[in-house]
Image (cartoon, rainbow, N blue to C red):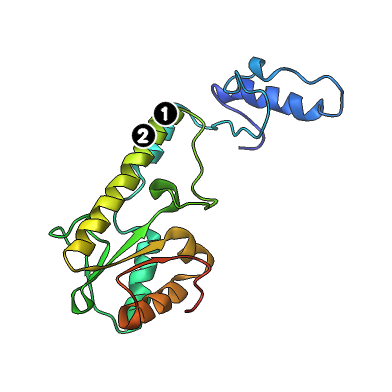
């Protein structure tokens, strides 16, 4: 963009630039004068750089199936010799990967949407927090309900978190899953610290 700003963000960008250049002085302007920062008194705040229509379009484009972590894990499991079905509609929660031979269902969950506890990717949006809290709570309760239904019907359930695949890699996650499938317990959550059993 060569330093140019467009639309509504121009005023905010200029004011933020003014904040940065005057940060050495003892008197800083109030955040109430900056669009998007009204009512903020302290702490880190990230101002959205796109308008609400663009943000809505971007959020609508986020996939629920065939995500990159899911594709990478499927590829790694297939390389280890596992054969599976994907997105089986007849099972509670439509698991991402189903291994009928082991009667195992694997969910590849995004840390943000499924609220992975103490994960840096599970941040809370600053706009409309009550909406997001209700949405996230509904996601978590639905996940718990689906996993309980699978366990009670005799399936084994594993949850692979997005951060595991990002930080340790799909090959490591597949290795941990391989050991779990062959020797593990009924339920398992695959985390980055699970390098190898």
Q: Which residue lies furthest to the right in this view?
A: 25
Q: Identify whether 52 is placed above or below 102.
A: above
Q: In this view, does 116 lie to the left or right of 178?
A: right
Look at mark 1 in the image and give the residue it sits on. 130
Residue at (21%, 68%) from the top-left corner? 155
Residue at (75%, 25%) from the top-left corner? 19
Q: Do the residues labelled 2 and 1 touch (CB within 8 Å)?
A: yes
Residue at (30%, 52%) from the top-left corner? 144
The kind of secondary structure element at disc 1 is: helix
Neighbour class for label 2 at 10 Å: few (<14), some, many (≥20)?
few
Look at mark 2 in the image and give the residue it sits on. 134
Tell me where residue 177 sits by quadrant: bottom left
Residue 37 in the image: state x and y as whole percent.
Answer: 60, 23
The kind of secondary structure element at disc 2 is: helix
Q: Nearer the viewer, residue 109 or 146?
A: 146
Neighbour class for label 1 at 10 Å: few (<14), some, many (≥20)?
few
Residue 87 showing in the rendered view: no
Q: Identify whether 12 is placed above or below 187.
A: above
Q: In this view, does 153 lie to the left or right of 144?
A: left
Q: In this view, does 171 lie to the left or right of 75?
A: right
Residue at (50%, 63%) from the top-left corner? 166
């Amino acid at each position: 963009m060569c330093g140019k700003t467009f639309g509504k963000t121009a005023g905010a960008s200029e004011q933020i630039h003014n904040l940065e250049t005057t940060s050495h002085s003892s008197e800083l302007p109030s955040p109430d004068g900056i669009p998007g920062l009204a009512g903020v008194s302290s702490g880190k705040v990230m101002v959205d750089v796109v308008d609400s229509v663009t943000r809505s379009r971007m959020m609508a484009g986020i996939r629920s199936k065939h995500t990159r972590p899911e594709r990478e894990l499927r590829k790694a499991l297939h390389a280890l010799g596992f054969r599976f079905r994907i997105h089986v509609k007849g099972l509670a929660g439509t698991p991402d990967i189903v291994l009928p031979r082991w009667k195992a269902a694997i969910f590849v969950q995004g840390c943000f949407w499924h609220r992975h506890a103490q994960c840096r990717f599970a941040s809370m949006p600053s706009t409309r927090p009550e909406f997001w809290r209700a949405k996230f709570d509904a996601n978590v309760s639905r996940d718990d309900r689906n996993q309980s239904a699978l366990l009670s019907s005799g399936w084994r359930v594993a949850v692979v978190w997005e951060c595991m695949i990002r930080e340790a890699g799909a090959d490591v996650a597949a290795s941990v899953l391989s050991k779990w499938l062959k020797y593990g317990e009924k339920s398992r959550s695959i985390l980055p610290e699970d390098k190898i059993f």
